[in-house]
């Protein structure tokens, strides 16, 4: 057990194995592996990816950035070399998986066009489609901020792309502002997604 607990990857894999065992128990107890089950799996992936993405938005805004401001030059280098590359990797990929799984779920449920257009084709008559559509577009904005603002500027900050000290200072502000924008959007997105599934 100690070997598992020393590694986050091994700990995560054990959690995944437990989930697979639970899915196997579902089948043993008579559950069918059908379209409904596949929708459940897609929703599960979507929710887990969103938890990682939103959780990292909190971590960056309330822990990593404030800690960075409190550090001297050496402390900032440690954060830049150790925390930042790992964090941005997880943010990029969890945001993409969240969007892809969400899109797949809409296709599987048969309301992709209704949701993506907020029900415009039906005169915005279905509140669920309006709420879901708003949530989707805000989530796509969050994804865009990660990939079109935060990641390119993190590359400058981390030295992956060229930039002098002035460029790095500008990039740092853009990363901070992008992280703050995603933090502002996180709660409305969660609210809209949960409301669309539970109120209507």
Image (spheres, rainbow, N blue to C red):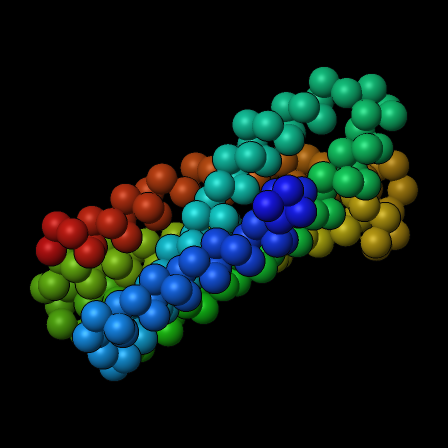
Residue displayed at 76% across by 34% down: 79
Image quadrant where residue 67 sits: top right
Residue 178 vs 145, above or below: the answer is above
The percent coordinates of residue 185 (x first, y second) are 41, 42
The percent coordinates of residue 119 (x first, y second) are 19, 67
Image quadrant where residue 171 sits: top right
Q: Is residue 46 visible?
A: no
Pick the quarter of the image with the C terminus.
Answer: bottom left
Residue 196 vs 171, above or below: the answer is below
Residue displayed at 20% across by 63% down: 129
Residue displayed at 41% across by 66% down: 20
Q: Is residue 157 left or right of residue 58?
A: right
Q: Is residue 123 left or right of residue 26?
A: left
Pick the quarter of the image with the N terminus.
Answer: top right
The percent coordinates of residue 100 (x first, y second) are 45, 68
Residue in front for this viewpoint, 12 or 60: 12
Q: Is residue 132 visible?
A: yes
Residue in front for this viewpoint, 130 or 190: 190
Q: Is residue 131 left or right of residue 4?
A: left
The percent coordinates of residue 84 (x first, y second) are 71, 42
């Amino acid at each position: 057990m100690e070997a598992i607990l020393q590694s986050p990857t091994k700990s995560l894999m054990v959690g995944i194995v437990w989930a697979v065992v639970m899915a196997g128990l579902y089948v043993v107890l008579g559950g069918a592996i059908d379209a409904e089950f596949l929708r459940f799996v897609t929703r599960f992936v979507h929710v887990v990816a969103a938890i990682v993405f939103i959780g990292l938005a909190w971590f960056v805004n309330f822990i990593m950035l404030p800690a960075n401001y409190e550090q001297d030059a050496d402390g900032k280098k440690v954060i830049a070399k150790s925390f930042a590359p790992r964090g941005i990797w997880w943010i990029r990929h969890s945001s993409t998986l969240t969007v892809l799984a969400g899109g797949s779920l809409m296709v599987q449920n048969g309301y992709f066009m209704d949701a993506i257009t907020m029900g415009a084709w039906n005169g915005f008559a279905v509140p669920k489609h309006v709420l879901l559509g708003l949530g989707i577009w805000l989530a796509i904005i969050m994804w865009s901020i990660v990939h079109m603002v935060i990641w390119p500027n993190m590359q400058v900050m981390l030295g992956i792309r060229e930039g002098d000290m002035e460029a790095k200072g500008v990039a740092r502000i853009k990363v901070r502002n992008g992280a703050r924008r995603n933090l502002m959007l996180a709660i409305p997105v969660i609210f809209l997604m949960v409301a669309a599934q539970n109120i209507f």
